Amino acid sequence: MIIGKFTRTSDGWSGTIQTITSQTKARFVPNDKRENERAPDFRVMSGHCELGAGWRRVKKDGDTRERISVILDDPFVATPLNVMLFETSRSGEANLVWQRQQDGEQPHQE
């Protein structure tokens, strides 16, 4: 399920996250303060509020389109959402995709 549409900016992505209950403008901002290789590559921001974090994923088949594994958190949601930002076949455009996990299933991995 596509829950967001984003366009590339000079340093990240900008767009809107939309669900049944809310619509939020958001930006993927590079995390310039990465303290180690496991730290997120991006912070997901709405205004001055941090909504989550994202890690770049590289597909092994040589596809160079950007993929970012994202954890979104909200105090009004029981558990964080694991979603993926996928650059589409149209350069500079990306979809934020959410898929309900089955019991015991792990978040997006590549």
Image (cartoon, grey):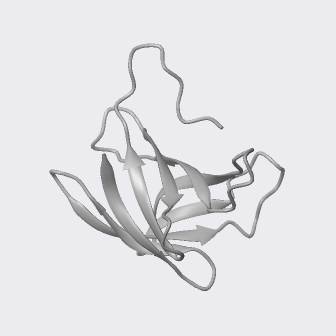
Residue 99 relative to residue 20: left or right: right
Q: Residue at x 69, y 47 (%)?
A: 59
Q: Residue at x 68, y 56 (%)?
A: 63
In the figure, 42 relative to 57: above or below? below
Closer-to-camera residue (94/54): 94
Q: Residue at x 42, y 46 (%)?
A: 73
* Res 49 seen here: no
Residue 44 relative to residue 41: left or right: left
Q: Position of residue 82 (x, y in %)?
A: 46, 40
Closer-to-camera residue (14/79): 14
* Res 68 seen here: yes
Q: Position of residue 97 (x, y in %)?
A: 40, 49
Q: Residue at x 59, y 54 (%)?
A: 68
> Which residue appears farthest toward the top when viewing the image?
104
In the figure, 26 relative to 71: above or below? below
> Which residue appears farthest toward the right when viewing the image?
36
Closer-to-camera residue (30/103): 103
Residue 11 relative to residue 7: left or right: right
